[in-house]
Image (cartoon, rainbow, N blue to C red):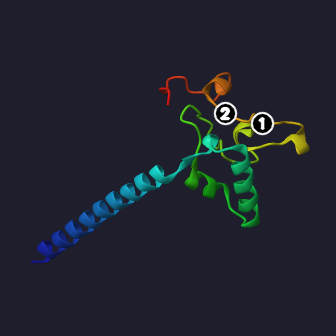
């Protein structure tokens, strides 16, 4: 009888773990669908978001949960406003003399070391 109860406990634990993993996977998938490509927003909209995020003390993690970098970009932290891709997220003209282009597209990025050429055109 003891083995039967132990087997039932283990079965319930494994089933619960699998169901939780499936639920988490579904949640991540839904979150992925809600994320917006950062480079597709207007520069003005991006600047508004960055200013509001700074006021609210948002983290880089917040950006990666809400926005996506281009599919052709393999930079590990491209959306990090300070250490990511400056062309993608920043306009550092005042601080560093670097001005981001108005629009980021594949042709702009194809010379970058993080460019992934095998991605299909959007």
Who's the residue at 62% across and 58% down the image?
A: 62
Mark 2 element type: loop
Residue 50 picture quarter: bottom right
In the rendered view, tell whether residue 115 sits above or below residue 9. Answer: above
Instruction: Give residue 18's position: percent from left, percent from top.
Output: 29, 60
Instruction: Give residue 109's position: percent from left, percent from top.
Output: 66, 27
Quarter of the picture containing the N terminus is bottom left
Classify residue 79 as left or right of residue 86: left
Q: Which sits in the foreground, 76 or 116?
A: 116
Classify residue 30 as left or right of residue 116: left
Mark 1 element type: loop
Who's the residue at 27% across and 68% down the image?
A: 13
Q: Which sits in the foreground, 88 or 4?
A: 88
- What's the CA distance linking mark 1 and mark 2? 9 Å
Instruction: Give residue 110's position: percent from left, percent from top.
Output: 64, 23
Q: Which sits in the foreground, 98 or 22?
A: 98
Who's the residue at 87% across and 40% down the image?
A: 93
**Residue position for label 2:** 104
Instruction: Give residue 40's position: percent from left, percent from top.
Output: 61, 41
Q: Which sits in the foreground, 25 or 105?
A: 105
Q: Are marks 1 and 2 in contact (CB under 8 Å)?
A: yes
**Residue position for label 1:** 100
Using the image, tell me which numbered label, if any, was put on residue 32. none
Going by the picture, which residue comes out furthest to the left?
1
Who's the residue at 56% across and 27% down the image?
A: 116
């Amino acid at each position: 009888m003891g083995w039967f109860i132990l087997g039932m406990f283990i079965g319930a634990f494994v089933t619960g773990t699998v169901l939780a993993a499936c639920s988490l996977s579904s949640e991540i998938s839904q979150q992925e669908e809600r994320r917006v490509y950062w480079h597709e927003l207007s520069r003005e909209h991006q600047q508004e978001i960055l200013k509001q995020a700074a006021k609210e003390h948002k983290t880089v993690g917040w950006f990666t949960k809400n926005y996506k970098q281009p599919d052709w970009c393999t930079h590990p932290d491209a959306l990090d406003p300070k250490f990511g891709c400056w062309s993608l997220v920043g306009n550092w003209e005042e601080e560093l003399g670097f001005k981001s282009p108005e629009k980021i597209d594949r042709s702009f990025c194809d010379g970058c070391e993080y460019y992934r050429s095998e991605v299909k055109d959007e």
